[in-house]
Amino acid sequence: MFLSRRATQAEYFDSPHLPKAEIIEFYRSLASANRLFMFAEPFQRTLPALLTPERSSQVSILDLGAGDGSLGKVLSGWAAKRGWTWRITDLDVSFDALALNPGGRNVGGSVLALPFRDASFDLVIASQMTHHLDDAQVVQHLREAWRVTRGWILVSDLHRNFALYCSVWLLCRLHNFPKAFFRDAVLSVQRAWRVRELQSLAERAGIEAARTRLYFGARVLLQAQKQKSVAADASRR
């Protein structure tokens, strides 16, 4: 049945050898699509609820698969309006994508082997990146995210369902996005998640504190607090 299982076909823009002009065009189209789908909203709504007001004021965040750093720019600007300082480090495997964010804290690297020490960040986030990986890679990606956070991880990704597929298809047609971007956009929904799938992979990664939930029907959110997990382990000893 259509969408009953995740698609395994790789997306075109996951290729490591794309012309720079295509990469620039891709991120221009992605910026438009992200605005339409309010890609930063799950983080703006969820992160302040996870953190106390005191802890929200000074936060170090690692954004995995950050691309051109758009999410970090939106979040840091949004936090600044509230008097908070959110120091965001953008990590991506594509140096060409990071080059589109010349003023950011950019780090080239793989989400499967993060070049950071344990507990390096208050928060580790990922937005619509995890569906680009296969299941085994997701387990490793989550292990690494869990290793380098000292507080929370929050993963926001697409929810695989027919209504979202149709919405993405229609919006891409109405906004006349390039064909390659159009194909990848609908394929992203086909590669996306159901709640139980992502929860199961988090458990395989050893993140017992993980909680995965459906977010307004269009996204799946996975969150876990390391401090709570450590405290629970200590209480059992």
Image: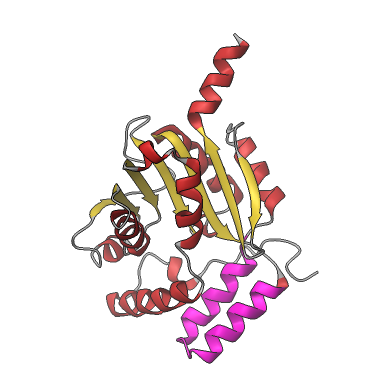
At which x and y percent is residue 169?
60, 82
Please tell me which residue lies in front, 153 or 67: 153
Nearer to us in this view, 170 or 49: 49
Place of residue 215 in the rendered image (x, y in percent of width and height, measured from the top left): 62, 58
Residue drawn at point x = 33 percent, y = 57 percent: 72
Residue 183 appears at what percent x and percent y? 54, 79
Q: Quadrant of the C terminus?
A: top right
Q: Residue at x 50, y 45 (%)?
A: 49
**Quarter of the image holding residue 217?**
bottom right
Q: Residue at x 25, y 53 (%)?
A: 106
Q: Is residue 191 magenta?
A: yes
Quadrant, the N terminus? bottom right
Which residues are drawn in magenta?
163-192
Q: Tell me: 68 left or right of 140.
A: left
Whether residue 180 sits left or right of residue 60 in the image: it is right
Residue 74's quadrant in the figure? bottom left
Residue at horizontal 39 percent and vertical 74 percent from the top: 31
Spot the residue most to the left: 103
User: In this view of the protein, can residue 231 be seen by the observer?
Assistant: yes
- Residue 113 appears anywhere in the view: no
Q: Main secondary structure of the magenta part?
A: helix
The count of marks equals: 0
